[in-house]
Amino acid sequence: MKQHLYFLPGTMCDQRLWSPLVSELQKQDDLPFDYHFLTIAELSTIDKIVNDINRQIHHHNIILVGFSLGGYLASAVAVKYPQLVKKLIVLSNLPCSLPTKEQEERARTLAWVKQRGYRGVPRQRILHLLDTSAYQRKDIIELITAMDKSLGEKVLVQQLSATTKRESLMSQLQAVACPKYFAVGENDNLVDVTKLQVAMNADEQMHLQVFTQTGHMLPLEQTEDLAAWLVTVCRDDHLGMA
């Protein structure tokens, strides 16, 4: 029986985020997976977005993979619709409030866009999302730029307005019975790895993998290693990660 992998992208990302990773996964000829790509609806609240994600999912006992904002939304789906999710895999996200600095940066961005319009993601912002080892990765920088350009100002304003204020889901996730796997880059400027490690100690169903020389854009920075880890996670229902 095939397993269904559903993927949720992050802020100003779309299905293209997952293309390199899925290409790596498809090299594993024995993986009985169907791949499905979810979208983040242009709605005014996180709860409305979560309800729309539920509408897009057409199977039960799925493996739900979310990156960044998508990781938070995937966690919210698992909390609200636990019957849907067999395994939850969260990349580059701690499903809690955003760091104060990130909230302030988003507020500045919204104010700037309101006053002057949006001309695309600045290169410095892209580099802030990457480990220094990826600063010369033109493929990553060009993909982030292309996704941002396609989605544009309207989506940026909607996503920042609707999703910056987030409640912590960690205690609610502890009540969800499915295995929960978290993966994060050791140099992710948006995720506190220490807080994730503390959270893992509170729930034996939560497992953490930290990738070295990696920033926030884990699916693009460490595609091969992430694919190998995902294969192991998807194959083993009782896996404990270091």
Image (cartoon, rainbow, N blue to C red):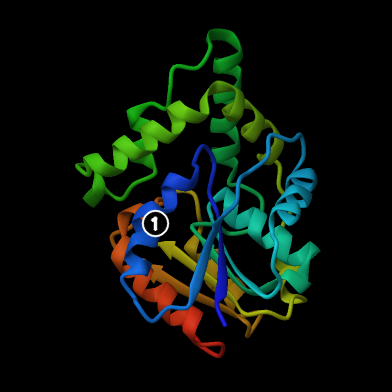
Question: Looking at the rendering, in which quadrant would you find the C terminus?
Answer: bottom left
**Towards the viewer: 84 or 76:** 84
In which image quadrant can residue 64 be found? bottom right
Residue 232's spot in the image, x, y percent? 42, 81
Residue shown at the point (60%, 29%) measured from the top left? 155
Q: Can residue 187 be seen in this snapshot?
A: no
User: In the image, is residue 118 above or below residue 93?
Assistant: above
Residue 27's spot in the image, x, y percent? 31, 70
Question: Looking at the rendering, in which quadrant would you find the N terminus?
Answer: bottom right
Q: Can residue 183 be seen in this snapshot?
A: yes
Circle 1: is it few (<14), some (14-19), or many (20+) Cα within 10 Å?
many
**Towards the viewer: 176 or 194:** 176
| Amino acid identity at mark 1 | Pro
Apparent side of residue 206 relative to residue 215 in the rendered image (left or right): right
Residue shown at the point (31%, 54%) measured from the top left? 221
User: In the image, is residue 234 above or below residue 99?
Assistant: below
Residue 188's spot in the image, x, y percent? 41, 53
Give the residue at mark 1.
Answer: 219
**Secondary structure of the residue carrying numbered label 1:** helix
User: In the image, is residue 106 above or below residue 33?
Assistant: above
Q: How many numbered badges does the structure rendering display? A: 1
Q: Hey, which residue is sitting farthest bottom in the picture?
A: 238
